[in-house]
Amino acid sequence: MVMKDKGHHHIVGTVKGDKGEITAYKLDNGELLMKEQAVAIAKRGEINGVTVATSKSGEEFLRSLPDEDKSNNLDNLPVVEDVDE
């Protein structure tokens, strides 16, 4: 049985931009976070199953922790409706 730490969340969906890039994340409590907000929260260790990575252009983003289950990769999570930026 997996225990969830109190106050820590899991990402259950993503919002994608016109080019298919993830722009926001939906947490298990229903909250939608823009990418920058999610990165800041993940840096505090409050989102389970992800790490903060940096693109070649220097932009920080979330990456799933590696495991054998591809279904939980961020790109494979359900896409949810766009949020106002």
Image (cartoon, helix red, strand yellow):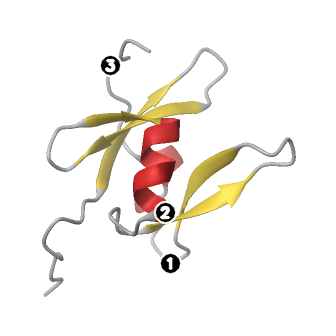
Residue at which label 3 appears: 81
Residue at which label 2 appears: 43
Residue 9 at x, y percent in the picture: 25, 60
Residue type, numbered disc 3: Glu
Classify residue 23 as left or right of residue 79. right
- Residue lying at 62% horizontally and 31% vertically, measured from the top left: 21
Q: How far is disc 2 from disc 1 in space, using C-alphas? A: 24 Å
Residue at which label 1 appears: 68
Q: Is residue 64 above or below residue 25?
A: below
- Residue lying at 28% horizontally and 59% vertically, measured from the top left: 10
The mark closer to the camera, 2 or 3, is 2
Quick one: SS at disc 2?
helix
Tag 3: Cα neighbours inside 10 Å, few (<14), some, or many (≥20)? few
Residue type, numbered disc 2: Lys
Residue 77 at x, y percent in the picture: 39, 46
Indicate the quadrant containing the N terminus: top left, top right, bottom left or bottom right: bottom left
Q: How far is disc 2 from disc 3 in space, using C-alphas? A: 25 Å
Mark sitting earlier along the chain (2/3): 2
Residue 47 at x, y percent in the picture: 35, 62
Quick one: SS at disc 1?
loop
Residue 4 at x, y percent in the picture: 16, 75
